[in-house]
Amino acid sequence: MHGLSLASDLVEKALKTLEDYHVREIRKIEVEVGELAGISPGELQSGFSIAASGTPLRDAELSIKIKKARIRCHNCGYNGPIESGKHPHLHVSPRCPGCHGFGIEILEGGGVTLRNLDVELE
Ligand SMILES: [Zn+2]
């Protein structure tokens, strides 16, 4: 469900970006998925297939890049990347690599960002 709502937001954002243009075809939609977005690229991809069906985005290719996360720790002041595990996107509650505390703030890589749209104009 999470994947679908994130994908719906993405589709909505892309269509809104394009509403002022006469677009013939949307070839590709490029997004960044943060390590701490709480979603895997696979989940986003399948959510996108559902969310994009029946919209002008239905034939567009979804290109996903992983964005490294950066955090700040309120406890020890650590500021930097998280410890990258084997499946970084599965970090549900990331910890500080310095003090292993949970009192962190996500500075980057906490969501899904629309990076680029490859379209053909009329
Ligand atoms: Zn810390």
Image (cartoon, rainbow, N blue to C red):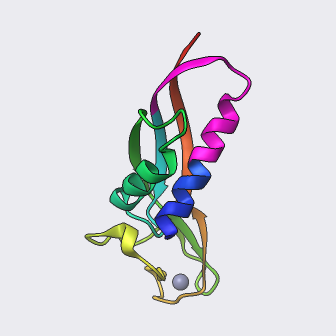
Mark count: 0
**Image coords of residue 96 (percent x, y):** 48, 81
- Looking at the rendering, in which quadrant would you find the C terminus? top right
Classify 115 as above or below 91.
Answer: above
Taking the view exactly as shown, the residue that stands out farthest to the top is 122
- Foreground: 67 or 49? 49
Classify 14 as above or below 117.
Answer: below
Taking the view exactly as shown, the residue that stands out farthest to the right is 20
- Foreground: 96 or 110? 110
Q: Residue at x 74, y 24 (%)?
A: 20
- Foreground: 118 or 35? 118
**Image coords of residue 82 (percent x, y):** 43, 70
Q: Residue at x 43, y 63 (%)?
A: 35
**Image coords of residue 93 (percent x, y):** 48, 83
Does the image show residue 85?
yes
Q: Residue at x 37, y 55 (%)?
A: 46
**Image coords of residue 4 (percent x, y):** 50, 61
Does residue 63 show up magenta in the picture?
no
Q: Which residues are magenta?
A: 11-28
- Foreground: 5 or 69? 5
Q: Residue at x 61, y 39 (%)?
A: 14
Classify 115 as above or below 89.
Answer: above
